[in-house]
């Protein structure tokens, strides 16, 4: 009984084609469309990956440029030149350097109040600020 139903599917014809051939053709078409769809999605993903890799390379170049700029800006000779040019700083004289043994003595001198070189201004000497009313 089951065999006769199965054999009938293999032998039955629709418009000159066997049913089993039509089923096989539909499965083949479904597989072909599925492979095409997955291949298209994979192509898009690979294009996205290539774009991201291009962005990564560009960002790495930018990081290298920024690091080079930081190295230039933090160059000790440049900082020394700018500090002497704009702030009037000079290298420390060797006579002002202190040894490790002399640090406690220097620290005790810093704690003592230094005499003022000029007299302090009293509040009466201060100039009043004019209001812009």
Image: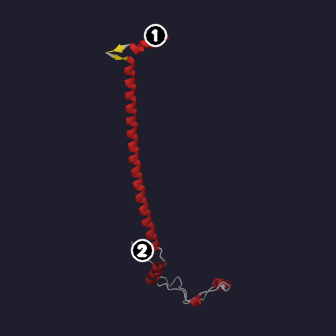
Between residues 118 and 101, which one lies in front from this camera angle? Answer: 101
From this viewpoint, which residue is outermost toward the left? 15
Between residues 121 and 118, which one lies in front from this camera angle? Answer: 118
Give the residue displayed 40% in from the left and 26% down from the top.
Answer: 27
Is 100 left, or right, of 29 in this rendering? Answer: right
> x, y percentage for residue 68?
44, 69
Give the residue displayed 41% in from the left and 15% down from the top.
Answer: 10
Above or below residue 69? Residue 15 is: above
Determine which residue is flagged by label 2. 131
Tell me the element at label 2: loop
Count the labels in the image: 2
Give the residue displayed 57% in from the left and 89% down from the top.
Answer: 94
Between residues 122 and 22, which one lies in front from this camera angle? Answer: 22
- Residue 19, numbered circle: none
Is 116 left, or right, of 6 in this rendering? Answer: right
Q: Quadrant of residue 63?
A: bottom left
Above or below residue 56? Residue 131 is: below
Determine which residue is flagged by label 1. 4
Between residues 106 and 98, which one lies in front from this camera angle? Answer: 98
Scheme of image coloration: secondary structure
> x, y percentage for residue 72?
44, 73
Q: CA distance from mark 1 to mark 2?
A: 111 Å
> x, y percentage for residue 123?
53, 82
- Structural crowding at the residue carrying mark 2, measured as other residues with C-alpha within 10 Å and reported as few (<14), some (14–19) or many (≥20): few
Give the residue displayed 42% in from the left and 58% down from the top.
Answer: 57
Is 38 left, or right, of 117 in this rendering? Answer: left
């Amino acid at each position: 009984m089951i065999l006769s139903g199965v054999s009938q599917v293999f032998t039955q014809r629709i418009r000159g084609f066997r049913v089993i051939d039509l089923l096989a053709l539909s499965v083949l078409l479904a597989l072909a469309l599925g492979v095409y769809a997955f291949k298209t999605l994979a192509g898009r993903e690979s294009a996205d990956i290539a774009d991201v890799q291009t962005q990564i390379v560009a960002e790495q170049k930018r990081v290298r440029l920024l690091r080079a700029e930081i190295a230039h800006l933090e160059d000790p000779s440049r900082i020394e030149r700018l500090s002497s040019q704009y702030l009037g700083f000079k290298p420390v004289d060797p006579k002002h350097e202190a040894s490790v043994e002399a640090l406690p003595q220097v620290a005790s001198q810093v704690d003592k109040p230094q005499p003022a070189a000029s007299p302090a201004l009293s509040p009466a000497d201060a100039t009043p600020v004019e209001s812009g009313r």
